[in-house]
Amino acid sequence: MLPLVGGVILALVILWIPFAPFVSPKPSRIWRGYFTVLVRHGSHADALLPLAVAHLGPGVISELTATVDFYDFTSSVRFPYGQLARRLDSLDPRRDSYIDRIEGFFSIVDGAEEFHAFYVPARFTSFALFMDLWRLWGPCGRNAWRLADFDPLEKLLSVVALIGFTVVMALGSRKRRRGSTVLAFASSLLWLPAILAGGPSVLALCLLLLSLYLPIIRLRLVAPGKGATDLRKTREFLRVYLGAGAIALGLFFVLGGFSLVSLIQLLAPFACSMLLVLLVPFFSTAVDSHRKTRVFAPVPLLKSGADPGKGRQKALALALFSIAIVVLVPLLRNTVFPAPLLVWGARDFSWDSVVSLEHGSKADKLPDFSDFVAHEAYQQTLGLGRTWREPVRNERIYHREYLVDPASGVVEARLRTVKVLDSTWLESLVARPAPESVEALLLAQGRSVAVAVRGTARALAGELASVALAFCSILALLGWDLRTGLLIRGNLWRLNGAARRDQIS
C-alpha cells in the first residue's frame, strides 16, 4: 500500500511541474507567450476593460497600456499609444504608417460588430485565465467577450471524448472489467491538463497513445506475472508504446513547432503513464486483499459471447469521430483576430528576415518586424534629415558640416557619418523592446512573422498536419483490427476433448 501512495504523490508532483510558476510562458495557440482576448465594443465587459487590464497585472499589451516611440525634436521618446492622438496631429510628419496601423492590433471588425483586443502574458494556463475572466466579467458569449486560445465548447467535447474513449476501451476487457475501468479512467486524468491547455492536435496525440497504452494496463492487471508468455507480451506492448510515443512526440514538434514548455507538458503525463504501469501490481494486490475468498470458484460451462476485440474497435471509431468533431467546432464558431503568419526565409530577426518580410508583404497585413525596423530608423534619423523609406543593411546617415581652414580662411564642406544602420543597431532594437508594446509581442515569437487579421481556421492550420497524422494512425489501427479479426467462431461444445477447469469450448 505504501508504494501505491508514494507513486500517486510522485505522479501529482510530475503533473504539477508544467504549471509551476518557474515554467513560463505557458503554451498558447495563437501568439507565442501571449493569450488573445476579444471584447465586444459597448458591452458590459468593455466598460470593465480598464479594470481587467489592471487586474491581470503588468505586461498586458492593450490600447490602454501600449507604448510607441517617436521623435520629440531632441531625441526619441516613449509615449502611451492611447494618448498619442493628443500629442501628434494626424498631419504631423512624425506620425508614420507604423503608428497609424498599430490600431489594427487593438480594434477588429467582425461583420457588423467591433471588438477590442488585448494580449495577456502566458504566466498561467489558458484555462486559469478563462476562469479569471469569467469571475470578473461573467459568462462569455459571442456578444460579450472571447478568449481566442480557449473555446469552452471545444474543451468540453475534448474532455468527454477522452474519458469516453478510455471507458469504452476498458469495457472491452472480459476479466477484471471494474479494475480496468478504474485504471483507464486514471490514465485519462493524467492527460486532462494537457488536453485543457492544448488544441485538437494534443487530443489526437493523446487518443493515439492511449490506444497503445491501455492494452498494457489490461495485461498487467489481468495476468500480473502468470508466466513468461504474459511477460513477453507486456514487454512487446511496452516497446511499441515507447517507440510510438517517441516518434509521435517528435513529429508533433516538427510539424507544429518546438516549444520547451509544450514538451514538458506532454512528457509529464507520458512519464506518469509509465509510473502507473509499475503501480498496477500494487493496485491489484490492494483490490484483491479486500475481496472475499471463495471455497469453490465457479466453473463456467460456456465461454462469454462478448468479443473483446469489438470494444477496441468501438473505441477507435469513437476516437476518429471525436477528433473530427473537435476540429470542426472551432471552424464553425469562427472568430477573427490578429494572428502571426510564417514567412518563408524569415527565421530570425536579421536583415535577411527584414527583406523577406518586405517581399512577402500583403495589402491587408498589420505592422510586422520589418515595419517596426522602418519606424525606428525613421524616428531616430528624422532630425538628421532622413525621409521615410525602408532601411537597408549598413545604410549610413551623413551630416554636412563646414570647417574653416585657420591658415587660409577657406571654408570647406565635408560629410560626416553620424549613424550606421548595421547589424549592431538592429540587435539593439531586438534587445530592448518596451515590455507592454507591440514590439514585445512580435519579438516574443522567436522569429520574424507577418501579421494579418485571420479567422480560427488560419490559427488551426499549424495543428492540422499533426491532427491528420494522428487521425490516419488511428484509422490504420482500426483497419488492422478489422482485417485480422476471426471470420469463424465456433460455439459448439466439444465433449470429445480434454476439458479444462474454467471452460469447455
Image (cartoon, rainbow, N blue to C red):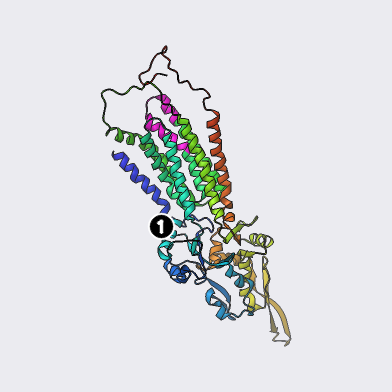
Residue 228 magenta-highlighted: yes
Question: Residue drawn 50% across and 41% down?
Answer: 319
Q: Residue 18: give x, y in percent of width and height.
A: 43, 52
Residue visible at 50% across and 72% down in the picture: 64
Image spot of residue 244 (x, y percent): 51, 38
Q: In this view, does 105 lie to the left or right of 275?
A: right
Q: In this view, does 14 lie above or below 115?
A: above
Quarter that holds the C terminus: top left
Q: Closer to the camera, 130 or 16?
A: 130
Magenta span: 211-234
Q: Is residue 261 visible?
A: no
In this view of the protein, which residue sits in the foreground, 400 or 289?
289
Q: In this view, does 278 lie to the left or right of 64?
A: left
x, y percent for residue 252: 54, 46
Residue at 44 percent of width and 40 percent of height: 166
* Closest to the observer, 338 or 60: 338
User: Viewer-proximal residue, 98 or 393?
Assistant: 98
Q: Where residue 464 sits: x, y (%)?
A: 58, 48
Vertically, is 108 above or below 467? below
Please rate how many residues cluster around mark 1, counting C-alpha atoms within 10 Å: few if below 14, some from 14 to 19, many from 20: few
- What residue is shown with label 1? 21
Regarding residue 315, the answer to whether it shows in the image is yes
Q: In terms of secondary structure, what is the magenta stretch mainly?
A: helix
Q: Specify the quadrant of the image occupied by residue 346.
A: bottom right
Q: Which amino acid does label 1 sit on?
A: Pro
Residue occupying the far top of the picture = 496
